Image (cartoon, helix red, strand yellow):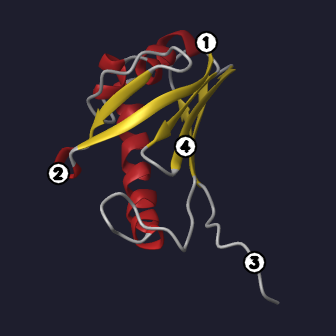
Amino acid sequence: MESSSTTLPDIKEERLLMASVAKVWPKVSTAEGMGSWFMPSNMEAVEGREFTLEAGPFGQSPCQVIEVKPQQKLAFRWGKDWTLTFELAEQAEGTHFTLIHSGWDADKLTEFGQAHAVIRERMAQGWAGLVEKLAEVMK
């Protein structure tokens, strides 16, 4: 059975964070907060706002905020192909945090000339560690 689509599955990481949404939101919606567990940036949670992620050895990645629902959801375009979404849901024990990294295509290369399929595997492992780091920051 041939598939015409070469789309690869989204990377999805979920975690219960032991903090309220009010405490988690600034960690995913401000440059300072994101820098504490993800990457340095000059991000502002304003729809349409362009910003730059400082991606270490990969240099600067252009991004644009595409959706902001305060204390619930932040989504931004990352580079030419990806979308990164952070979703928060208040729970009795804390905040249910969901990270979704979408835009993977087996036929595409990143800006750095690397195959999405290869980078996706690396990023999937990296996100697991970063979400763990966010959980540590929230303690």
Amino acid under label 1? Pro
Left or right: 73 as drawn, with respect to 110: right
Above or below: residue 8 compared with residue 56? below
Of all residues, the one furthest to the bottom in this rendering is 1
Reading the image, the residue beneath label 4 is 83
Determine the residue positioned at 43% across, 41% down.
Answer: 131
Q: CA distance from mark 4 to mark 3?
A: 22 Å
Mark closer to the chain start, 3 or 2: 3
Mark closer to the chain start, 2 or 4: 2
Amino acid under label 2? Pro
Q: CA distance from mark 3 to mark 2?
A: 35 Å
Q: Circle 4: is it few (<14), some (14-19), or many (20+) Cα within 10 Å?
A: many
Res 35 quadrant in image: top left
Q: Circle 1: is it few (<14), some (14-19), or many (20+) Cα within 10 Å?
A: some
Reading the image, the residue beneath label 1 is 70
Left or right: 99 as drawn, with respect to 40: right
Res 69 quadrant in image: top right
Reading the image, the residue beneath label 3 is 4
Between label 1 and label 4, give the one nearer the viewer. 4
Point out residue 33 in the picture as x, y percentages from the top left corner.
35, 20
Point out residue 13 in the picture as x, y percentages from the top left corner.
55, 47
As helix, strand or loop, the secondary structure at mark 3 comes to loop
Between label 1 and label 3, give the one nearer the viewer. 3
Q: CA distance from mark 1 to mark 2?
A: 32 Å
